[in-house]
Image (tube, helix red, strand yellow):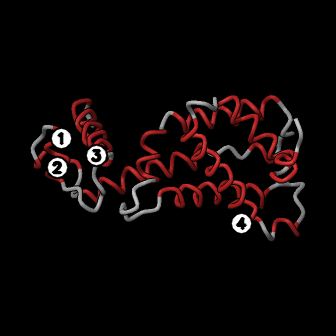
Amino acid sequence: MDHRAERMKSLIIQTFFECLKTEDFSQLTVGQIAEHARINRSTFYRYFSDKYTLRDEIVDDIVQDFAEHMEVDFLHMNIEDEVHTRSLQDGLIRLSSQKCRLEILWNQNLLGRNVFDEMMNAGARKVEAEILNHPTISSERKQLADWYAKLLVNNFLVTVRWWFSHSDTVSASQITTMMKRHMLYGTIPTLKESR
C-alpha cells in the first residue's frame, strides 16, 4: 500500500474512533464516518466494505497486538527481579499509548464484539501455552493451566482498566509497584498490610 493510501486508511480509522466518542456503533453509519473524515463514501468503500469490516480490522489488530506483546517471561523470572519490573512497566506503557482507543472500544456496549474479553482470551491462550511448556510447573498445576492463564491475564487487564481511569493520579511506576506487590503477596494480605 502506498503512503497516500496508508494515510487515507489511517484517517478513516481515526475518524471511526472520533465518531465512537459520541455515537454508539449500532447507530453509526458509513455516511457519518465519510462526512466527518471529509471524504466521499466511495473513498471509504475503497478500503472497507462496510462499518463492520472496519470494526473487525481494528479489533483484530488490537487483539493480535495485545497477544503478541503479552509478556510471558514472568513465568521464568524472579518477580522481585528488576528485569521483571521493567518488562511489566514497558507493557503498561505500551497499553497506555492506546488508552483512548481501548477505552472507547471497551465502553462500546453495542459494538457487537467484546474487545476486553477478546484481549483477555488471546492473552490467556499465550500464557496457557507457556504454562503447559514450563519445565518446573507440576503436571497437577498444568491441568489447570487455562484457569491460571485467564486469572493472570484478567487481573492484569482489570488493573489496566482501573489504572486508565486513575492515570491522572497513579503513574506507570506506581501501578507497576502495586501490581508486583499483589503478585508477590496476594490481594488479601496486601489489603490488610499496615503501612
Q: How crowded is mark 3: few (under 14 residues within 10 Å), some or many (20 or more)?
A: many
Q: Nearer the viewer, mark 1 or mark 4?
A: 1
Image position, residue 114 (x, y; %): 46, 61
111 over 94 or under it: above or below? below
Point out which mark residue 16 bears. 3
N-terminal label among 1 and 4: 1
Task: Classify residue 142 by image quadrant.
Answer: bottom right
Label 2: which residue?
A: 32
Could you give the CA–CA distance between mark 1 and mark 3, rounded to whole angstroms?
9 Å
Image position, residue 138 (x, y; %): 90, 63
Could you give the CA–CA distance between mark 2 and mark 1, rounded to whole angstroms?
6 Å
Q: In the image, what residue occupies the spot 77% across and 57% down?
A: 131
Q: Which of marks 2 and 4 is in front?
A: 2
Whether residues under marks 3 and 4 lie with C-beta atoms below 8 angstroms apart, the answer is no
Q: Residues within 10 Å of mark 1 (few under 14, many from 20)?
A: some
Where disc 4 sits, the SS reads helix
